Image (cartoon, coloured by chain):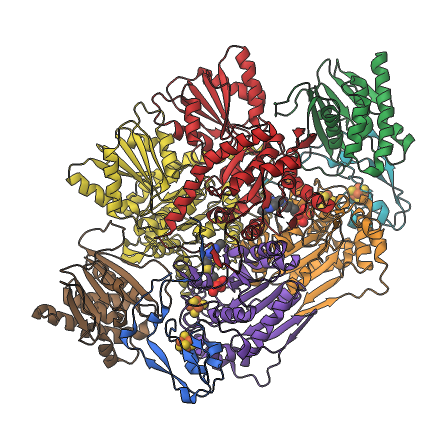
Chain colours: A orange, B purple, C blue, D cyan, E brown, F green, G yellow, H red
Amino acid sequence: MAVKIRELPEEELVYGSFACAGCGGILAVRLALKVLGPRTVVVTTPSCLLGVTTFYPQLAFKVPCVNVTFPSTAAAAGGVAVGLKRRGREDVHVLAVAGDGGTVDIGLQALSGAVERGHRFIFLCYDNEAYMNTGVQRSGSTPRGARTTTTPVGLRGRGEDRPKKDMMRIVAAHDIPYAATASIGYPQDYLRKIQKAAQTQGPAYLHVLAPCPPGWGYPGHLTVHLARLAVQTGQWPLAEYEKGRLTQKKIDNPRPVEEYWSIQARFTHLLS
Amino acid sequence: MAVKIRELPEEELVYGSFACAGCGGILAVRLALKVLGPRTVVVTTPSCLLGVTTFYPQLAFKVPCVNVTFPSTAAAAGGVAVGLKRRGREDVHVLAVAGDGGTVDIGLQALSGAVERGHRFIFLCYDNEAYMNTGVQRSGSTPRGARTTTTPVGLRGRGEDRPKKDMMRIVAAHDIPYAATASIGYPQDYLRKIQKAAQTQGPAYLHVLAPCPPGWGYPGHLTVHLARLAVQTGQWPLAEYEKGRLTQKKIDNPRPVEEYWSIQARFTHLLS
Amino acid sequence: MIPNLPTPHLKFRTGSWRTVRPVLQADKCNNCLLCWLFCPEGSIRRGQGHVTIDLDYCKGCGICAHECPRHALQMAEEAPSHLEGGAAGA
Amino acid sequence: MIPNLPTPHLKFRTGSWRTVRPVLQADKCNNCLLCWLFCPEGSIRRGQGHVTIDLDYCKGCGICAHECPRHALQMAEEAPSHLEGGAAGA
Amino acid sequence: MQIRWHGRGGQGVVTAARLLGRAAAVYGGKFAQSFPSFGTERRGAPVTAFTRLAEGVIRDRSQIYRPDWVVVLDSSLLGNQDVWQGLGPGGSALVNAPRGLAVSPPPGVNLYCLDAAGMAREISGHLPVNTAMVGALAGLTGWVKLEAVQGATADLLSPSVVEQNLRLVEASFRWGEKIRKGGRKE
Amino acid sequence: MQIRWHGRGGQGVVTAARLLGRAAAVYGGKFAQSFPSFGTERRGAPVTAFTRLAEGVIRDRSQIYRPDWVVVLDSSLLGNQDVWQGLGPGGSALVNAPRGLAVSPPPGVNLYCLDAAGMAREISGHLPVNTAMVGALAGLTGWVKLEAVQGATADLLSPSVVEQNLRLVEASFRWGEKIRKGGRKE
Amino acid sequence: MREYINGNEAVARAVRLARVDVVAAYPITPQSPVVEEIAAQIASGELDAEYIRVESEHAALAACYGAAVTGMRVFTATSSQGLAYMFEMLHYVSGSRVPVVMAVANRGLAAPWTIWADHQDSIVCRDTGWIQLYVETAQEALDTCLQAYRIAEHPEVLTPVMVCLDGYVLSHTEEVVEIPAQEAVDTFLPPYKPQRVVEPERPLVFGVGAGPDLYPAFKQAQQEAMDRAREVICRVDEEFYRIFGRRHGGLVDPYRCRDAEIVLVTLGATTGTAREVADRLRQEGIKVGVLRLRALRPFPAEEVRRALAGCRVVAVLDRNCSFGYEGAVCTEVKAALLGLKEPPAVVGFILGLGGQDIRQADIEDIFRRCLAAGSGAVHQVAAAQSR
Amino acid sequence: MREYINGNEAVARAVRLARVDVVAAYPITPQSPVVEEIAAQIASGELDAEYIRVESEHAALAACYGAAVTGMRVFTATSSQGLAYMFEMLHYVSGSRVPVVMAVANRGLAAPWTIWADHQDSIVCRDTGWIQLYVETAQEALDTCLQAYRIAEHPEVLTPVMVCLDGYVLSHTEEVVEIPAQEAVDTFLPPYKPQRVVEPERPLVFGVGAGPDLYPAFKQAQQEAMDRAREVICRVDEEFYRIFGRRHGGLVDPYRCRDAEIVLVTLGATTGTAREVADRLRQEGIKVGVLRLRALRPFPAEEVRRALAGCRVVAVLDRNCSFGYEGAVCTEVKAALLGLKEPPAVVGFILGLGGQDIRQADIEDIFRRCLAAGSGAVHQVAAAQSR
Ligand SMILES: Cc1ncc(C[n+]2csc(CCOP(=O)(O)OP(=O)(O)O)c2C)c(N)n1
Ligand SMILES: Cc1ncc(C[n+]2csc(CCOP(=O)(O)OP(=O)(O)O)c2C)c(N)n1
Ligand code: SF4
Ligand code: SF4
Ligand code: SF4
Ligand code: SF4
């Protein structure tokens, strides 16, 4: 069920955004819309994505976009899904998008509820591992050790001291019809998973690693490189949950994590 | 590490409550306090428990009780834990108690956050499988098929149509140091698990089945009987999560579920 | 006036809610303490040789009687006279 | 006036943010479309035989150049003159 | 006319209050208002409810402090002082009890005892007494006709138990009517 | 005295505005106020910031519409009309550019071009130009002493880069001072 | 059809009559019976709607919002803590100009915990950009919910409406209610036809971000819509009257105010009790009246001024307290009266918090205190009165 | 020590000087730098406190509450959507009489989305039972946070305090701030000594349920505490002055009001701009003044009356709108003036929503419009003004 790149539509459904140069998040959304196509409604929430795509006068989506408050992305998406269904518009995909903060922290409860109710929608978490829109504060998805503005490094601070919340397992525990992690460094895999999500008759969850140049502290051209390296060093497992089974792609000979850390300012203190 | 019944203290730490005759929830809390003892702070939230224990002039706890809003039980418990720690009172247990609604629905996010932060506290969910305090509305923990006031049975209603949220797996996905399900029908097992929770150096989660006579529709003397039957019919697995492993007690020769359903008004429509 | 009040504070004796009461046949009781464990109200007292029942807050739910393996407890119709302090809904 | 507005609506050409620009050596390009896939801005167009670059909204991030397996794209210093429509922070 | 109902959680006290109101309002052409004692009801705990009846629109929204009638569904509540509160001379009480009460009402209060439990038992084993008390009250006072109480009963109860309750209502109504017509009181 | 700073996200525009303010306020005995253009800053996107300087307490909280000075950290922004907005005759502009600008400022505006990038490169490969622009402005105007700018620089920058920046500040200050004293303008 | 139902049931009946498409709500005392009744109507097939059984009130309103932007007629109901928990969404929905209708079974706010009536929960939401209508009877609850859709969906208004009914005192009190016929309701309230909905064919951003240059205009538009709502509320009430023969006063509902020396300003159910007292005192020859504010938002400043201009003392009964000032209605009434040539004295009374019963005696006491009050001075009985 | 910092940094500095024990907060623009700075202070060892990195604002305040009842001095900060999201907890904390201090970096509310300054977010919380102090400068932000603990923890007050500073305009604007010495602060603000804390040895229920008989008394107590807070706020400001040589006006901060014909009522940072304009117009011989309300809760009705009694026209600048009425401060000021023998005319202006800049020219325009205004009438410029 591989997605053929050449067959993807030319039309850009998100274009002209204010994202930083090299933003992994906007790439993740762009690719998702490539697969889902123009009959998609984006539901989104405070995050870099909202900030860079739907602040007038720069509105960057070519599909409808429903913005909602930070804690209730999935709840609003559920409402949209129910409404479209009643209107007989089941040909339209509902794509809820949130950052990691809006997914694993303040948006978790709404997500859990919406998944439990079984609405047909896709929830896409683009994970840049911190609250970027507000200036790189830690989130529940910040990996252990990472420096953020709220987990600084100092005499009594060693960066984030708690492990990253395992959202994939949490969602799987909801017996969701389909869930997957992905990385923009592995686009074929990611596109295939989007397609699977689109074909799911119920809620689907995608959690995609989306590096952020200013937030992680690296030059923008390395975004895709880092997204790949995260997988290759075992920091970002590619997993899938389907028919009640969680599978994870094995990494043979993982590369040393230092390789991944060394090109990001947020980890430099771990190397000395 | 069995708990010796005879060695449990005589003192009742919750006594004189306004719970219905035969309430499983108050029994669950009573037993928890028997193990934890008087150096415990209860943190609780709107639910039958709050309604029946801390409405003046009937205050039924002999330990301090901190009531807080419905969505933030675990957050407040975390605050209490941090405060007690700073005051050097690490001899005091923090026992957050919520019903299933206050745990798997509106309290889920706060619980997830508090567990992730690693506060030392015990979260006890007494599960009566609906919002009882407000009059038996369905919750995310209502089992499939059950009739509640918001999942009525009628021409177009067949009781709850979604499966019960698997809170144990959700909590386990947080890599919590200790978690367990229990049933007041198996007190030895339950008491042992409370003790384990008490000894955990970090968050611990207990999810105990607590039948509710008016909510489920059965005469109060059957509370313990039903709590046992739920286990014996395979409706309530006794599970434990420790050191990263989730184990579940096998039920050999489970009894037919009809036995369990037939004595509860909420399930009668399933039998015809 | 601050809504933090000393606990416990019991105005009503919920024993008045009872319509049936548990009656112990002491000779049948072998002090296994199951009833003690299972009583939601904590209204059973451990004693020498057998338990006793504290009727002030026993609501007559009947769990003790139902769970007693030796049928040492039986529920009996409550006499109307047992009532004094009523209770209001909370 | 209701805060539901037609989209897309682009006031600023974010190409003006660019300080370096991708330059294609068309002969090296074998149209593998990796750059097309990876460009966060969607600023690469698929063409006959090789891609082309739409500089209106290319921010010069350099991903295309970095990811091009054949090094057909190179980042070059941007001439200051390319700029017209500026942009304000959002 | 102000009525206060006493019983225990699970006995249908609130339904009784409503039943009377409905009988008067929907089947009796009168105006009525009924409400529970505001709060959650726990099984076994004492519960009260209220009914107001009038010929015209009822605008007063305050609670009932001086009932004209008190109806007690469970005689075990009689020890409780609350039961008699506000009931003054000239007031009346209807109690579900076999005759001969240990507790006596305040001076000047007319007391009527109906063995509603016994009456219900005669019809069926597990009938609650709430409809019987409404019927008896209607019979005693003549505020609403038997048919009105029966109409409201049929509306409010689930179909499976309506039949028995209609009979119970009739029996208790007749009991009350007889007293009213005979002027007998206890 | 009102200064507007222009640059791109990531170039330290906001720091420059603050640096000048701090130099004046903490090391110059004056009063100052500095603020960013209110909003989030995306890397590469145009960013502005503001500084007000005065001898007495500054109470005005409104934004700056008519700057006395405009400082541009990145000459690629000059095509943008926003850069010159509100700058009238008698106003001055300091631009980081090797001399010879294609774009010309509004009539009556004094233009100063400093090859700050080149100056920074001479000291170290990766130095941003923001401190250089502050130094140059201080030199050009004489509002604050070199030591004041250096003091503020040492406070605000992370220790590892202070040394180089102090040298850069000195060089640019001298450049500006020379023009001021020599009265030269471009 | 003459029915005997309580306020909650009346609301649920209105939901059915309004042919609501989507309901999203979370239970809370004393609102729960509303959603239970709606669930029952759906289960029985009487109502063809989707009930989204959300996990919280914040989600309830978010789900309503999501459904509404697809063109659905939506409904929710809540109370107290639940209303407070959806506070962020309240602003969001009104700012988005989405015509949600919500019933609020009024109850006090914790701490301390209460489940009983006062108006604190909705009064503290008076700045959220919602229209707020307070009803006096179960009948009015039903009628007003129907009217609310007409008001909210009016193209010149497009503003959500809260229909507030006193917890227990109305929500749990059965009384005579006339149920309108479905056909008549269908005439009064045609299907919702939104101008802008979510559809891929005409993509819109719902809830854009707006900079300092644009944002104020949106807020001005919101305020202007509220101003237009004043008239729409009155017109809809009149139209309702023409079809159903009942009206409820539009923005304000004055009772024996014309020649009154003392007027008591009220909200909600207590008004009935106050009418009783007024009638009684009138019989004694004491000239008192009652002014019920049916709309708190938009605030009927003009109508209040007109109704109160001639009286000597105005008493305001607040079932709420804006701690550190006074009852909120008192403040707002006072503000409306400033500028009158000879404004009446205004005395504020805070009563009935957390379910404290408001008896005829209490109201009589208020009137008598005002009778005794000096003519010029403005008194503030700022503290909550307890007995 | 003379420092050059912005409002957020000033707040963070106050947290350190106050020796706060526990901080629980969630980031939001424009408040984030406060918590970042606190995190940095903890990481560097300058501040010995626990920072609970909560997953939402509702949890932030709940965690503060939990820590406070164990006897900790606690702090949180938020803005806009975050403040709205913790709305339920706001009531809970004040009702529980827990002395939390919170900084609010004021910003408008969505929809539409904005991240810029106005006062809507905190003004809509004026009924929550929190004391609200609005500051004019970064210096005052620092000083007021210190004072806030004295006020909140005062045994006669025990009420949480919000310290509100305009987003960006104060939060992100650096200026000269005098940093008090730690020893002096320790004298001014001794450690928090709560009377009732969570301890197994003396079990209490925190946040009891209360029936209709009891509940009103708790609310009355809350209201009385607010009344006492009026005096405490003034006293604390005076005491602060004695130690640090700075005072900020207590409840209100009048500027050239004494003989003013026209007075502009303001909150927060805009006051500075207004002072400039007032000085300029005074030079022209136009008698204008500025009355800054430092406290919005408790509302300084008496002080407002006193300050405004003599003038001809009062202009109220509201950086908020209570949709369907007018600017909230305007309403409250009007209410305070009712009952004056010859009250001034009051004209409300809504300006500066969603970050709209308030320029000297705008304020001058307000003054000039009032000059032209007739003497008697009360005008309402109800709609938001956009340019
Ligand atoms: C209730 C509420 N709290 C806080 C905020 C402020 N806020 C807006 S975006 C954001 C961070 C978003 O982080 P994330 O979801 O990880 O997305 P990212 O920006 O990193 O892409 C925050 C904290 C808000 N809008 N609403
Ligand atoms: C924000 C909020 N929403 C709703 C409520 C109303 N409420 C109080 S208790 C309760 C149900 C509690 O259910 P659960 O947690 O399952 O406990 P139970 O009563 O069943 O023991 C509800 C919905 C509330 N107090 N706060
Ligand atoms: S800060 Fe990071 S996530 Fe946000 S727009 Fe920039 S690159 Fe993307
Ligand atoms: S309703 Fe159920 S859970 Fe609540 S007190 Fe009664 S038995 Fe216990
Ligand atoms: S009847 Fe119930 S409450 Fe009474 S002693 Fe037995 S178990 Fe306890
Ligand atoms: S430089 Fe970046 S934005 Fe420009 S075309 Fe290449 S990948 Fe796209």
Q: Is residue A35 left or right of residue B224?
A: right
| Quarter containing the N terminus of chain B | bottom right
Q: In terms of image quarters, where does ligand 6 lie?
A: top right
- At x 65%, y 37%, the residue is H183
Q: How many marks?
A: 0
Q: Quarter holding the C terminus of chain B?
A: bottom left
G96 to the left or right of D8: left
Foreground: G45 or B16?
B16
Note whether H377 is above or below F38 in the view shown: above
User: Is residue B111 at all visible to an observer of this figure?
Assistant: yes
**Residue H373 image position (x, y, % from top left):** 43, 17
Q: What residue do we see at 28% from left, 61% from top?
A: E49
Whole-percent x, y for residue E87 in the image:
19, 60
Q: Position of residue G385 (x, y in %)?
A: 33, 44
Residue A220 appears left or right of B74: right
Q: For this rendering, which residue is in front, H151 or G290?
A: H151
Q: What percent of the width, then of the height, locates residue A176?
A: 62, 64
Query: Does H303 sit above or below residue A118?
Result: above
**Of D33 and G218, the residue lying toward us:** G218
State whether residue H361 is above or below residue D90: above
Q: Residue furthest left?
A: E182
Q: Nearer the viewer, residue D68 or H292?
A: H292
Q: Can I make out residue A88 in this image?
A: no
